[in-house]
Image (cartoon, grey):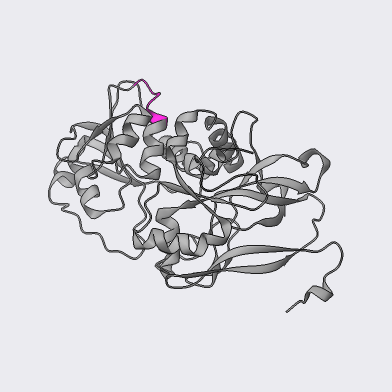
Amino acid sequence: MTTSDELTPQAAQATAYWTTGPERGELRTEVLPVPGPGEALVRTLYSGISKGTEIVVHTCSVPPRVAEAMRAPHQEGSFPSPVKFGYLSVGIVEGGPEDWMGQKVFCLNPHQDRYVIDTAALTRIPDGVPARRAVLTGTVETAINALWEAGPRIGDRIAVVGAGLVGGMVATLLRTFPLSRLQLVDLDPERKQLADKLGVEFAHPDDAKADCDIVFHCSASQEGLERSLQLAGDEADVIEMSWYANRDVTLPLGEDFHARRLSIRASQVGVVARARRHRRTTAERLSLAVSLLADPVFDAFLSGASPFLDLPDVVQSLADGKLEALCHVIEYPGNNSSAKTDPKDRT
């Protein structure tokens, strides 16, 4: 253990959130290295909680079989715990190469107030994108990858099943496509408010229109996937974006799936979708994602904010269902923002 008396003048401390056991998390301090060549020191302004994945981590539910494959890009520790996890971080460069100094950046970094990282892992945030909104970059990237996977065509009939953060993002991007029909489908009637903000038609699963060319499934439920198969037209594709972690899913494959020659294809953001893999890098995909966030419609997904020191309690409240959120924003000291005010960028 390094003590404060042993720190060199150049060394600095940071605080990070760690999952330490099933439904347990804490803030831990660590010593930051001095940035080397090509590295930057970033002070975090905001991070976002990607509820679906992060609650799986918080409950230590990552299946051992895919534990390595599901590692976040800059994760420390190993599943199930202890693990430093997260991937929606926005900050400002305070040390490193001159051309990066003062630049606002997005990084697939865990929840941590300061960190040192290779500049190749940073994505510059355009001037027209507020820093708070930029925490959504990683989720927009997920939606882009799914669209590359599906390849929607002009005049398509599309349903997005599950109006959470990921499903809402997919629908947001699709709303500008020349489609014949787009429906955002969810059991919760309150999600109509989100659909209205996005300018997308909302439908209860019982009322959703069938014969779709593509169905994006994002509800992370067996019932949602069953309904997605029913909504897909003959020989159509269901793009599966849900991560079920250690839950078993049973499907009636003797019904629509086999009789109507349907396809279920996984979409996972860890690699660029096959249709673009040889012509796009992950860095290019991230740059595209953050550029799209110039559209203020994405503020509809920023559904609450809390200070960094409250993060352990916030994660538990999300897991308990006491706190409802699409993307809950964590605010860090020194960003001139208040967690009690409207969830928009004020930096």
Viewport quadrant of the N terminus: bottom right
Name the foreground residue: 68 vs 274. Answer: 68
**x and y, in percent, of residue 192 in the image:** 28, 36
**Start-end of magenta stretch:** 173-178
Q: Residue at x 23, y 36 (%)?
A: 235
Relative to 213, say whether 252 is above or below. below
Q: Is residue 182 left or right of residue 63?
A: left
Q: Residue at x 61, y 28 (%)?
A: 128
> Which residue sits furthest right?
9
Residue 287 in sight here: yes
Residue 284, by quadrant, is top right
Residue 315, by quadrant, is bottom left
> Which residue sits furthest bottom?
1
Relative to 72, say whether 58 is above or below. below
**x and y, in percent, of residue 27 in the image:** 58, 67
Residue 322, by quadrant, is bottom left
Q: Does 266 appear in magenta? A: no
Total numbered badges shown on the rendered structure: 0
Residue 160 in sight here: no
Q: Residue at x 17, y 46 (%)?
A: 258
Q: Main secondary structure of the magenta part?
A: loop
Q: Is residue 6 left or right of residue 227?
A: right
**x and y, in percent, of residue 216 in the image:** 32, 40
Q: Is residue 275 left or right of residue 252?
A: right
Name the foreground residue: 263 vs 17. Answer: 17
Viewport quadrant of the C terminus: top right
Relative to 306, say whether 217 is above or below. above
Q: Residue at x 58, y 55 (%)?
A: 73
**x and y, in percent, of residue 79 in the image:** 49, 69
